[in-house]
Amino acid sequence: MTTHYQAQGDVALLLLDNAPVNGLNWQTRQQCFEHLQTALADPAIKAIVLTGAGKAFCGGADIKEFGSAKALQEPNLLSLIIALENATKPIVAALHSVAMGGGLELALACHYRMSAPGCQIAMPEVKLGLIPGAGGTQRLPRVLGVEAALNLIVSGEGVMSERLNMVPGQKLFDKLATSAETLVDEAIDFAREVASDRPLPKVRDLPMKHPQADAYFQFAKNMVKNSPQAKNLPAPLIAIEAIRQGTLLRFDQGLAHEREQFLNLMWTPESRALRHLFGAQRNASRVPDLDKDTPVRTIQEVGIVGSGTMGSGIAMNFLMAGIPVTLLDSSQEALDRGLKTLSTYFEDRVKKGKLKPEKLQAMMKALKTTIRYEELSPCDLVIEAVFEDMGVKAQVFKQLDACLKQGAILATNTSTLDVNKIAAFTTRPSDVVGLHFFSPAQVMKLLEVVRARETSKEVLATVLALAKKIKKIAVVSGVCDGFIGNRMIEQYSRQAGFLLEEGCSPEQIDAAIERFGFAMGPFKMSDLAGNDIGWAIRKRRYQETPEMKYSTIVDTVCELGRFGQKTSAGWYDYQPGKRDALVSPVVQKCLEDFRAKHNLKVRKITDEEIVQRLVFSLVNEGARILQEGIASKASDIDMVYITGYGFPIFRGGPMHYAHEFGLLNMMGAMHRFAQNPKDDALFWRPAELLNTWVKEGRTFADF
Ligand code: NAD
């Protein structure tokens, strides 16, 4: 049973009980509907209380049903809502913990609402590329006023019940309960108080108006159009329009307009992408061979070796999560630099009002620094972030092995080195794991967890649980050069080099991929990271894998010492202290000279070709990564690209994009690119997995 019925004297209690958040799948809706009929038919019952068991009143519709016939099967959310609203006995919704989306719409159909303190109220549909589809855009403005409701619906963010209770004239809550524990009893008492009230109040009968409607809605639309969150996403503007229509139309007409827009949005690629990512994020921590009940170790103290760019950023994550940190470096000067980076960042947050001074004080108290390995001995986890050099890593891991207690986890933040080899420097390779943070480590959401050959399941489960505590999205990768993210980006950068040879300018390539939705094109990204980093990797490749063709055109700017923003010159020119990328005549000339010297023919390349070549380079390598078992799910690759590489959210990640584009179409395009004499046909050889899938009619969504 996912909904229970309990008669408490003359009040019937309907309890949603569908863990984890009482999602409204068909079974839950049907049982709720049946229990409602039972309560209405029983003459001894005078009023009804609707509430949720466990950690939520109700988290809303069941996203797994979206787009399927099950979502429409009777009783669907709309018919359940109508049944509640038209009930002949008063219904009190007793809200606690979370009332979101469809759950909030359910509550709005009840005659009265009561909330426990600290209940998070939200209409998060825009985060899935949708608008509320069961009356939310029509009922919420009637109880909160147009402006407060619009802010909730368009942002998708949660607001605490106490705050909404302060909105002047609000009719969302009839009462606030004293506590979550006493909520149900108080709601039952309240239900008895209102048992004989007639007519029963309905939200739909309240007026929905704004005194300066035209000006206000225009203002709201302008704000949304220019906001980065709403860029490329249709739902926020459509939500505003649905609310506007609600101020003009009769309730039922407004509802019909909302429904039509909701159903249209359900089929948009943007909503499909956002729903895919919602599932991808949930599934990222689910590893196929890792049982849910795998024991996890307690992590109460963390050590970090290396207090440079990464080490200091990594330390901030743990301090912010309330976990004490000991930072070790080889000299006091290096530690002082690390401490300065860390305190400057935190102090800046205090100045901006984003961090309380007391919290800063507590964090600085929880931070120790040292140059002696023995002081790491109490740590449950130590993360190494020293220079990217196998010799240095060997030295560090041997020392850690010698001083850490049994059961401690030894992690490396290496970007390129073999974690199996690093593990072999210790006598406990099953306790070694890669934790690949992205820079700036205190900001970037992505954490690649590198599972080495001997990493134990317990260690893996522990770091995955820990990632949640420090608010990272962890994706598990096997050991390979570059792991998931950097291995794929290398192919993307190689392709960008070929495009330069064929006549594209860096700014044309950047602009095309930015219009596609990337936060930054490959050349701006390289200027930001430092062009010397990619150059060093290429030089290694020229030696180690001479069969892999690179365009040396990309080395020419490095040979001029143009390493990017840090040298005020890279693929673009930069004015001192500014980050604006200005087209560089020096680079233009350098590229022209290279093409002339190598007798390269140039041609006009469309934006469409640029985008396809860059994105399909990612996808083809992503397919190899899946094939080799480096990633266990295509959606993990999408998570890596969305959270770590600025891939446009509304496109759902490279693998989802390829799925939407159609694998057969993509393979056709790759085949055409392989005919291009300037390209390496080897580059476009499809991953075996792609060939098999196309033959079997399968796609990434099956993976
Ligand atoms: P960094 O040069 O800024 O810092 C390295 C720190 O390690 C320095 O403070 C140095 O004094 C210290 N160190 C060197 N040898 C040591 C030793 N034997 N014992 C103790 N401390 C020692 O380097 P970084 O950019 O922070 O990179 C650190 C690691 O993180 C590297 O493995 C790198 O590949 C990886 N990484 C870097 C980035 C990035 O964007 N910078 C991103 C992901 C991963």
Image (cartoon, rainbow, N blue to C red):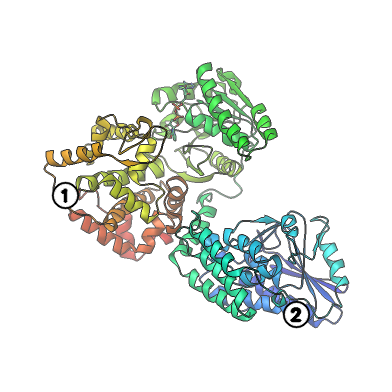
Q: Which residue lies under the disc numbered 2? A: 87
Q: Quadrant of residue 561?
A: top left
Residue 391 percent across, percent down from the top left = 40, 22
Residue 344: x and y, percent? 56, 29
Report helix, strand or loop for mark 1.
Answer: loop
Please give the label number shown on residue 618: none
Side (left or right) of 60 relative to 175: left
On screen, residue 204 versus residue 525, left or right, reads: right
Q: Nearer the viewer, residue 624 or 236?
A: 236
Q: Quadrant of residue 405?
A: top right
- Residue 602 is marked as 1
Q: Is residue 59 visible?
A: no
Q: Quadrant of ligand 1?
A: top left
Indicate the quadrant containing the C terminus: top left, top right, bottom left or bottom right: bottom left
Crowd tier of the residue under label 2, counting other residues whose Cα lies within 10 Å: few below 14, some 14–19, many 20 or above: some
Amino acid residing under circle 2: Ala
